[in-house]
Image (cartoon, rainbow, N blue to C red):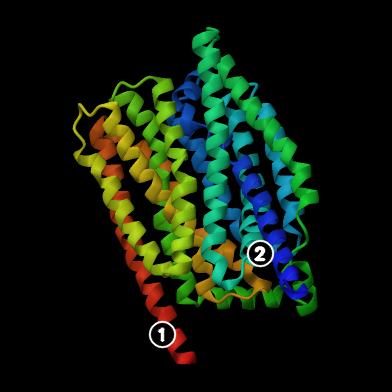
Amino acid sequence: MTHTDESRDSTALQRYLQLAVLVIVAGAIYPLIYLRQNFEVTILESFGMTAAQLGQSYAMLGVLFVITYIPSGWLADRIAPRILMSFSLAFAGVLGIWFSTMPSFESVRIIFAGWGLATGLTFWSALIKATAILARPNEQGRFFGILDGGRGLVEALLATIAVGLFAYWLESLGQDPADALRKVIWFYVVFMLAMSPIVLFALKENRGGARDVSEDGAGTSRLLDDLKVIATRPEIWLAAVCILTGYQLFWATYSFSAYFQIHYGLSAVAVGSITVAKLWMRPIGAAAAGFAGDFLDRERVLGALLLLAAVSLAGFVVLPAGAGTAMLLTMVLVIGILTYAVRGIYWATLESCNVPNRTKGLAIGAISLLGYSPDIYLPLINGALLERFPGKLGYDIYFSGIAIMGIFGALAAWRLKAIVAARSSEST
């Protein structure tokens, strides 16, 4: 092996090691915030909240995400991602300590507001930009697939431990559900706080950050010009629609816990086991989709996955009321692997948007503004539908609407493919 080959291998190894750190960090910060995925009923009982109040908390979280996405991208173009992500983990962890005291609903809203800033303003765009810059153009699919699949693996491992400990404290030791939940919260808090200094010192400064901005002398006028360019590119809008519809499909899975427990009579432990099993589909689906996108075609694969995920989710509408645990588990696993596959590849479409590194963070913020807007309206729509149409009918309408949007997402992905193909033919 020549010196050049050794240098190339070393560089690749360093990039994948940094990707591993990003994977763990991304898997550490969200599970506590979305604890409802495995413990929704226990949260409502322990905190003395209603489902509507919990929905309002998540809706407020979504509002903060939308408000901060573009500022988040602006920050990611100017401050090193490792600094932003380290701060986010520390801030979210401290808020988790407060959350573990199970305070009043007013305090919970403040905590969720803080989590919105920690994960929206200072974390998200930094994570996506760091990954996009680490990956070469022909590696975008696999890097984002590994990122989403890997963080899913981390979340699945953490959730498996958390549900196992919860079941042990609850069933073997006979502890109060609120006490068991409090210990689960502390479990996640400790992991977040431990990762904060690690990401700060383990990641290297990447290119495309503050240095690029200073060299170009970007000011207010430059920012407005960049936003104008981003807003007038159809590729960016199509990528945003793909993420919007794919994220909606994923959001629907957050309702599985309460849906199974209330309408199919499953216990809290059984529901937790099924939703944890779904989490294990993430590393499989996301990584497989990422590699498939690199070797086949990103947009074509994404379109097919969106369509299949939409059809699978619509299957809940025709699911019989007497469906057993095995049938529910099978459907959850199928929907899980498809929705995670969509998540594993949809950010790889950023490469097709042909955005320079200098403004990549800003583009990520703009795409996220539309793509993750379901954080605002889906909790409200879900709550309103269940109040207006109680029982299975409300869930049927909810799942059907999201499935229809998934079909529109598939059409957007295929349209983006056509634009990219036309651009390539013009340049040759």
Quadrant housing residue 181: top right
State the image coordinates of residue 328 (x, y, percent, origin top left).
30, 33
Left or right: 6 with respect to 410? right
Q: For mark 1, what is the residue?
A: 422
Please provide percent x and percent y for residue 256: 37, 34
Question: Which quadrant of the view contains residue 161?
Answer: top right
Q: Are marks 2 and 1 in contact (CB under 8 Å)?
A: no
Q: How many marks?
A: 2
The mark found on residue 20 in the picture is none
**Residue at the front extreme, as displayed:** 1
Amino acid beneath label 2: Leu
Name above or below for residue 189 compared with residue 126.
Answer: above
- Horizontal side, residue 171 vs residue 218: left or right: left
At x 34% / y 22%, what residue is drawn? Answer: 266
In the rendered image of this protein, does residue 322 appear above or below residue 256? Answer: above
The percent coordinates of residue 291 (x first, y second) are 48, 61
Q: Mark 2 or mark 1, which is nearer to you?
A: 2
Is any part of residue 372 visible from this angle? no
* Marks 2/1: CA–CA distance: 27 Å
Quarter occupied by the N terminus: bottom right
**At label 1, which amino acid type do we have?**
Ala
Against 271, residue 217 (above or below) is below
Q: In this orientation, which residue lies closer to the viewer: 394 or 172? A: 172
258 over 299 or under it: above or below: above
Q: Position of residue 418 (x, y in %)?
A: 37, 78
The reply to whether residue 136 is visible in this rendering is yes
Q: Specify the quadrant of the image occupied by residue 255.
A: top left
Q: Secondary structure at mark 1?
A: helix
Q: Which residue is mark 2?
A: 134
